Structure formats: structure tokens, C-alpha cells
Image (cartoon, grey):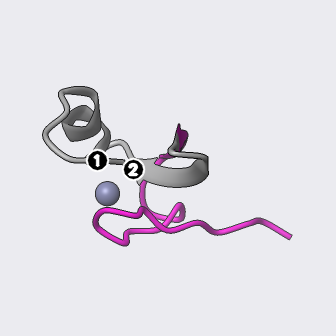
Amino acid sequence: MAEVRNCTKCSTNSENLVLLSTFHKGEEKWVCTRCFPKVIHGTVEA
Ligand SMILES: [Zn+2]
């Protein structure tokens, strides 16, 4: 069975967009490719 994850930023799920696993402050968080650039540039926290 496929595992479905939700983006912690915009709540889209891995059925719609690619989600990337991130690790921040000891917690694993999932961020979609649309929100990931903001995380890279430090605009938002993961
Ligand atoms: Zn997102």
C-alpha cells in the first residue's frame, strides 16, 4: 500500500506533488516541491 504524506506548509499530498523529506529540530517534516524553495531560501521554516 502506498504511503500518502502531506506537505507541512500547504497540506498538498504526495498524490499531487513530489514531497521531500526534511529534518529540522529533531523532527522529520515533509515539504512539497512548491514550498521547498522557500525553505531553501530561509523564507519559512520547514
Ligand atoms: Zn507545500
**Residue type at the position of mark 1:** Glu
Q: Which residues are magenta?
A: 1-23
Identify residue for label 1: 45
How many numbered marks, from 0 up? 2
Q: Secondary structure at mark 1?
A: loop
Binning the other alpha carbons within 10 Å of mark 2 as few (below 14), some (14 to 19) or many (20 upward) gives many
Q: Is residue 21 magenta?
A: yes
**Residue type at the position of mark 2:** Cys
Q: Is residue 14 left or right of residue 7?
A: right
Binning the other alpha carbons within 10 Å of mark 1 as few (below 14), some (14 to 19) or many (20 upward) gives few
The x and y percentages for residue 46 are 36, 48
Question: Ligand 1 sits in which quadrant?
Answer: bottom left
Identify residue for label 2: 32
The x and y percentages for residue 9 are 31, 62
Q: Is residue 11 left or right of residue 18?
A: left
User: Is 25 in front, or is 34?
Assistant: 25
Residue 20 vs 8, above or below: the answer is above
Residue at the image position 35 percent from the left and 42 percent from the top: 33
Residue at the image position 31 percent from the left and 39 percent from the top: 36
